[in-house]
Image (tube, helix red, strand yellow):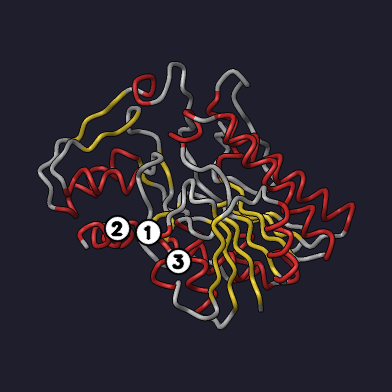
């Protein structure tokens, strides 16, 4: 098949492109390199089945041509990372909402299947863990910029489902939980790359907040396999799926694990959220997915432990 990946030079997008090429598909990528990097795809540039365009998805003429050429669209282009969201809220909201709108509009003209990548952030401050796809969203006030990302991605979901129900566009929505692996940068606040780089450099391992907040981390290859599986399954159309790992770990435990596995002498320090981001910054205490829906449909099950994920990131940064 001919497949388009928006944001295909990003961390997850580049791994998805790799896997699709290995399966024999022809892959087209568009990325403006605002958060992605040409380094992520340099090793596959020579593949005759790989094509990339450096441009924004808001360039409608370019995007329309790519959509017309492809049969399936993986929409990954988005503003990502807590640091970027806090520092550039206007760009976050406009990129996420308008970008998804134009992808759906163009796909709808030819009824091309679209897989939308949403986020675990849409669950907001809910404490009803594990999070199920039909659970309520509990977001903070509009005066807290932290929640603009969650809200923008929720609107993406509403829009995608509306296109499916009203116009018959085949869409699949995936809510991706914390994803980690080689090529992920810590530039936008991703915690494991930051911890690993600090530990390897002998710098203090810095925890934002008190470290008691917990997350579940998934290896990137497990995520991309799930995305492909859901894009191919006819019963996934019109549905929302959590994609993540259900093993929970606190950020404090994570820092200790990184220190142990890097054999680092780095001290572990905590920095209050108000200093790390902005005054009044809010975060969620726990983020744990119920992944039974994806498991029941496509057999999705994470294969990598947190220890192995950390080792893969350590190896990447050592290289």
Q: Label 2: how many residues lie within 10 Å, few (<14), some (14-19) or many (20+)?
A: many
Determine whether, in the image, residue 204 is placed left or right of residue 133: left
Indicate the quadrant where residue 148 lies: top right
For the residue pair 188 and 164, the one nearer the viewer reads as 188
Marks 1 and 3 close (CB-CB < 8 Å): yes
For the residue pair 192 and 77, the one nearer the viewer reads as 77
Label 2: element kind: helix
Label 3: element kind: helix
Marks 3 and 2 close (CB-CB < 8 Å): no
- Earlier-in-chain disc, 2 versus 1: 1
Q: CA distance from mark 3 to mark 2?
A: 13 Å
Where 184 sits versus 22, above or below?
Answer: above
State the residue at coordinates (13%, 40%).
266
Residue matched to label 2: 313
Residue matched to label 1: 181
Residue matched to label 3: 221
Residue 233 in picture, x, y percent from top left:
70, 72
- Earlier-in-chain disc, 3 versus 2: 3
State the residue at coordinates (33%, 47%).
192
Q: Label 1: how many residues lie within 10 Å, few (<14), some (14-19) or many (20+)?
A: many
- Earlier-in-chain disc, 1 versus 3: 1
């Amino acid at each position: 098949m001919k497949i388009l990946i928006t944001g295909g030079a990003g961390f997850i997008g580049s791994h998805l492109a790799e896997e699709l090429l290995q399966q024999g598909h022809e892959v087209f990528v568009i990325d403006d390199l605002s958060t992605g990097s040409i380094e992520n795809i340099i090793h596959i540039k020579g593949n005759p089945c790989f094509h990339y365009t450096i441009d924004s998805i808001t360039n409608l003429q370019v995007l329309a041509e790519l959509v017309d050429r492809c049969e399936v669209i993986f929409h990954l282009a988005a503003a990502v990372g807590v640091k970027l969201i806090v520092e550039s809220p206007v760009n976050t909201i406009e990129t996420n909402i308008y970008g998804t709108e134009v992808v759906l509009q163009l796909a709808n003209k030819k009824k091309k299947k679209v897989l939308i990548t949403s986020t675990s952030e849409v669950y907001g401050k809910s404490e009803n863990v594990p999070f199920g796809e039909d659970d309520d969203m509990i977001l903070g006030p509009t005066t807290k910029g932290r929640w603009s990302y969650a809200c923008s991605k929720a609107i993406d979901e509403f829009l995608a489902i509306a296109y499916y129900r009203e116009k018959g566009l085949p869409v699949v929505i995936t809510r991706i939980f914390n994803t980690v692996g080689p090529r992920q940068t810590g530039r936008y606040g991703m915690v494991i790359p930051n911890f690993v780089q600090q530990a390897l450099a002998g710098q203090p391992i810095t925890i934002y907040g008190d470290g008691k907040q917990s997350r579940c981390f998934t290896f990137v290859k497990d995520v991309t396999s799930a995305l492909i599986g859901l894009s191919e399954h006819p019963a996934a159309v019109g549905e929302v799926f959590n994609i993540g790992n259900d093993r929970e770990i606190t950020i404090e435990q994570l820092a200790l694990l990184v220190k142990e596995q890097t054999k680092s002498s780095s001290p572990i320090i905590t920095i209050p959220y108000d200093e790390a981001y902005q005054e009044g910054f809010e975060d969620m205490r726990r983020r744990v997915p119920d992944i039974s829906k994806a498991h029941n449909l496509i057999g999705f099950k994470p294969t990598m432990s947190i220890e192995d994920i950390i080792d893969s990131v350590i190896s990447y940064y050592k290289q």
